Amino acid sequence: MHMADALLSPTAAAVMYAASGLTAGASVHTLRKEEDDTKMLPVMAVSAALVFAGQMINYTIPGTGSSGHLCGGMLLSAILGPQAGFLSMIVILAIQCLFFADGGLLALGANVWNMAFYGCFVGYYLIWRPIMRSGRFTPRTRIVLASMLGCILTLQLGAFSVVLETTLSGITELPLGAFAALMQPIHLAIGAVEGLITSAVLLFLCQARPELLRDLDAREGSGRFSLKTTVAVLAVLALVVGGGLSLAASSNPDGLEWALFGNRESGYSENMALDEDDFGVTSAAADKAAAIQETTSFLPDYAFAGSDSAAGTSVSGIVGSAMVAGAAVLICAAGGFFRRKKRAGN
């Protein structure tokens, strides 16, 4: 669901940057009031790395010629809480954009909103927390139910936001009704698969260290592994997914690309039938953003520049996961430092 710059006017892009920026600021403000929990630093690092790696794997949606990939907002908010999850998603999306040219730089604010805000805040407060605190069903059933409903709902909201943003940007070749009729059903299927993936990871954590899941009473289950072992398992999983399983990712276009361009080459429909090399809006701001991305992206499209070598994908998965993990730790450590400094000055 990573939007390209051509799908947004500069005005719409600025509005989405402001919305995402204000939400990030509010998240930082909220987290500054919380007590330091150093044990969550490695958990945050490996969770964010796992989401980065998971987003590299596009899974085929049978019979459509399309594919989807993990967003990860629900997964991170269930572990870290909505604020820390949202900030982690910003780290992931910014690194993807700047260093791997995945999603437009002008569109980064919109991508953060569409892929992170709904999963982290709407998914958590509207779905995850009420279900997990309800006391109904077994803990594992509640995890599956919250994961499935949350992922499906939040991807529907994200997909419809893409439709609205392009409409408000004045891209007349993407009429709201026709575009929504393509985007919503395909992201319903993508959301259902993400719900299954999210459920699997969270069920593992429920077995391994139930206290790592938000709103789950740790007394409802005993951990089978130590915290160090659990973190190690997630770290290895991130490396295996990013460095190995990413090689098996579907080559079909993702839900957004499928809606825009179709997949006629594989015998499927043309859908909106836009020209992949010439669509949407052009602007000086988009050209400037593209120039910056061209300079910063050292592994564009998760590959070595000018090479089709599979090694580029593996290296991208490993390097990107490490960058995300390191950035998450640095941001959290810096936040803890400033909190302690502020307390010391009071």
Image (cartoon, rainbow, N blue to C red):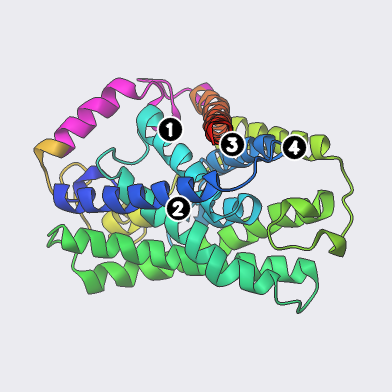
Which residue is labeled 1 in the image?
95
Mark 3 near mark 4, Cβ–Cβ under 8 Å? no
Q: What stretch is highlighted in magenta?
A: 286-311
Instruction: Return the x and y of residue 141 as percentages of the image width and height.
Output: 75, 71
Residues under labels 4 and 1: Cα distance? 22 Å
Q: Residues within 10 Å of mark 4 (few under 14, many from 20)?
A: many
Left or right, 343 with respect to 97, comes to right
Q: Which residue lies furthest to the front in this view?
A: 346
| Amino acid type indicated by mark 2 | Ala
Left or right, 78 with respect to 7, comes to right
Which residue is labeled 3 in the image?
49
Q: Residues within 10 Å of mark 1 (few under 14, many from 20)?
A: many
Identify the main secondary structure in magenta.
helix
| Amino acid type indicated by mark 4 | Val
In the rendered structure, which disc, 2 or 4, sits on the residue that comes first in sequence? Answer: 2
Instruction: Decide if residue 25 is in sight here.
Output: yes
In the rendered structure, which disc, 3 or 4, sits on the residue that comes first in sequence? Answer: 3
In the rendered structure, which disc, 3 or 2, sits on the residue that comes first in sequence? Answer: 3
Mark 1 near mark 2, Cβ–Cβ under 8 Å? no
Which residue is labeled 4 in the image?
231
Instruction: Return the x and y of residue 189 as percentages of the image width and height.
Output: 50, 66
Which residue is labeled 2 in the image?
116
In the rendered structure, which disc, 1 or 2, sits on the residue that comes first in sequence? Answer: 1
Residue situated in front as seen by the camera: 335 or 43: 335
Instruction: Return the x and y of residue 323 as percentages of the image width and height.
Output: 52, 27
In the rendered structure, which disc, 4 or 1, sits on the residue that comes first in sequence? Answer: 1
| Amino acid type indicated by mark 3 | Ala
